[in-house]
Amino acid sequence: MTESRLRPKVVLWWGIGLAAAGLLLNLLLPQVGYAVIQVNGSTRMDQGMLLALNVVVDLIRQTLLPLGIALIAASVVMAYIARLLGVRDDAEPDAAGIPES
């Protein structure tokens, strides 16, 4: 049986990072978007590129914050289950590859 490399601390830090990035995008992106659109969006090609960029950035913006929050919750559940099972992060695996608790 192979041991998972996913650790609750790593998942927690990824969740915090993604949640912070999503929060910053939600707060700062509208101001940056209005500044970019007003610079030069007169041709159809520019408007099409801005529309495509807007769609991609909106998808990223709407998924980062919920994904980060879900990862934070998953790390709490992982830590709770590991505590119930008695598995330690610093336990050395034995000859069969199973960490000793």
Image (cartoon, grey):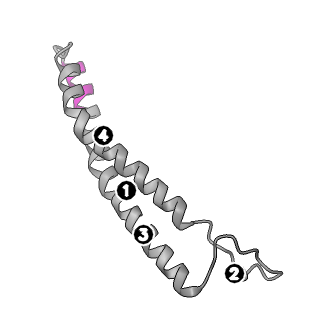
Q: How far apart are labels 3 and 4 at the CA level?
A: 22 Å
Q: Secondary structure at mark 1?
A: helix
Residue type indicated by callout 1: Gly
Look at 62% across and 71% down and name the residue there.
4
Residue 58 coordinates in the image, percent (x, y): 25, 42
Q: Secondary structure at mark 2?
A: loop
Question: Which secondary structure class fits the magenta region best?
Answer: helix
Q: How far apart are labels 3 and 2 at the CA level?
A: 22 Å
Numbered tag placed on residue 74 in the rendering: 3
Residue 96 coordinates in the image, percent (x, y): 79, 83
Q: Which residue is mark 1?
A: 68
N-term-proximal mark, 3 vs 4: 4
Q: How far apart are labels 3 and 1 at the CA level?
A: 10 Å
Q: Which residue is mark 2?
A: 1
Direction from residue 85 to residue 36 in the image, left or right: left
Residue type indicated by callout 3: Ala
Q: Secondary structure at mark 4?
A: helix
For the residue carrying disc 2, how many other residues have a C-alpha within 10 Å: few (<14), some (14-19), or many (20+)?
A: few
Residue type indicated by callout 2: Met
Numbered tag placed on residue 24 in the rendering: 4
Rendered image quadrant of residue 52? top left
Look at 20% across and 23% down and name the residue there.
47
Residue 97 coordinates in the image, percent (x, y): 76, 78
Q: How far apart are labels 4 and 2 at the CA level?
A: 41 Å
Direction from residue 88 to residue 84 in the image, left or right: left
Point out the stretch of residues depicted in magenta: 44-51
Task: Tell whether position 13 is magenta.
Answer: no
In the picture as drawn, the residue positioned furthest to the right comes out as 95
